[in-house]
Amino acid sequence: MFSQTVEYALRAVCHLAFIAPNSCTTEEIATGTKVPLAYLSKVLQGLAKAGVVRSQRGIGGGMSLIKRPDELTILEVVNAVDPIQRIRTCPLGLSTHGVKLCPLHRRLDNALKGVEEAFGGTTLAEVIAEPSESIPLCEFPGKSPIKNGPSAD
Amino acid sequence: MFSQTVEYALRAVCHLAFIAPNSCTTEEIATGTKVPLAYLSKVLQGLAKAGVVRSQRGIGGGMSLIKRPDELTILEVVNAVDPIQRIRTCPLGLSTHGVKLCPLHRRLDNALKGVEEAFGGTTLAEVIAEPSESIPLCEFPGKSPIKNGPSAD
DNA sequence: ACTTAATTGGATGTTGACATCCAATTAAGC
DNA sequence: GCTTAATTGGATGTCAACATCCAATTAAGT
């Protein structure tokens, strides 16, 4: 139900959250998140245009988060690449329904609202900090998914 | 986020719920729900294969619900044409994550779970019976969307 | 200035969702 | 059995999502 692009974007942002506020190369993200490099670069371009990540060209460049992980919600990432389209007017174009959705579409929209609220209420910081047997993106429990762990190099 | 096919299937089933347990023609459903006739016939074929609707060929034939509207949930309709894919194993294929999803994918799956529960907890009968200013599929408040209203003809 | 490391943008390929059309099939009613 | 009304199945078309590749651009370091 969520697009592949959303999945990729979240993985990438998650990776960036681990090393925030540092930056790293698209290639490193691709390797760490198992996302096809060429496509990931397009996804990151989208995130850059949406103001979620900052891109820096040239030697020592790469991608980094613009916001702090505790200020960035899952929803912002999702909406940056593949916006959740709430149902605001009758999909049948029935003018008399206007802004009042019928019970069917009201329920569909409520489901979307639930997703939106769940995503809007979770920051990347919460995702990467949550104690769990499985660490996001990380093959081995108890280890950081980032090479040598976060450092200020 | 929900596919066009899901939207069409729900409209069609909603129409059928209004006239249940009677049947009606695919063409009538197409007109009443503003769904392209040729495509709707494919969608209904899917619903028939999934056991949601019964199809009857020849004169006087058409489509009808197999279950009563109060026994049929939105979820069953959705899953018949475009199943909600819960996240059961790590999308990165990280074997060590196994059945335990990482915090990221646990949250994505929880969102899916919420949708699933919302849809699973609503029957078609509830949808078409709910008092509202807008009646599903119906242009005019207070009228039935079905030509001349339900009848046992 | 040159070299190297990195993103950017454009062109292109692939696949599945959405959609249409029509001949074949089925069943009712006379 | 013929006609008519209806679904079925197959062939086909279109377009956006997903994906890849490469030349152009940018910036750091020497």
Image (tube, coloured by chain):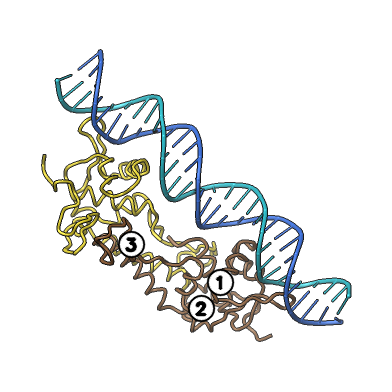
Chain colours: A yellow, B brown, C blue, D cyan
**Going from the N terminus, do you reach mark 2 or mark 1 first?**
1
Camera-side mark, 2 or 1? 1
Tell how many labels.
3
Give the spatial CA distance, label 2 vs label 1. Answer: 19 Å
Q: Chain of mark 3?
A: A
Which secondary structure lies at badge 3?
helix
**Residue C27, quarter of the rendered image:** bottom right
Residue visible at 55% across and 74% down in the picture: B13
Marking on residue B47? 1
Marking on residue B128? 2
| Of B57 and B129, the residue lying toward us | B57
Q: Quadrant of the C terminus of chain B?
A: bottom right
| Of D12 and B34, the residue lying toward us | D12
Q: Which residue is mark 3?
A: A116
Q: Are marks 3 and 2 in contact (CB under 8 Å)?
A: no
**Residue B65, quarter of the rendered image:** bottom right
Q: Amino acid at mark 1?
A: Leu
Say whether residue D28 is left or right of residue A78: left
| Of B152 and B59, the residue lying toward us | B59
Q: Provide residue B128's location: percent of width, then percent of height.
A: 51, 78
Q: Amino acid at mark 2?
A: Ile
Q: Provide residue B110's location: percent of width, then percent of height.
A: 31, 67
Q: Amino acid at mark 3?
A: Glu
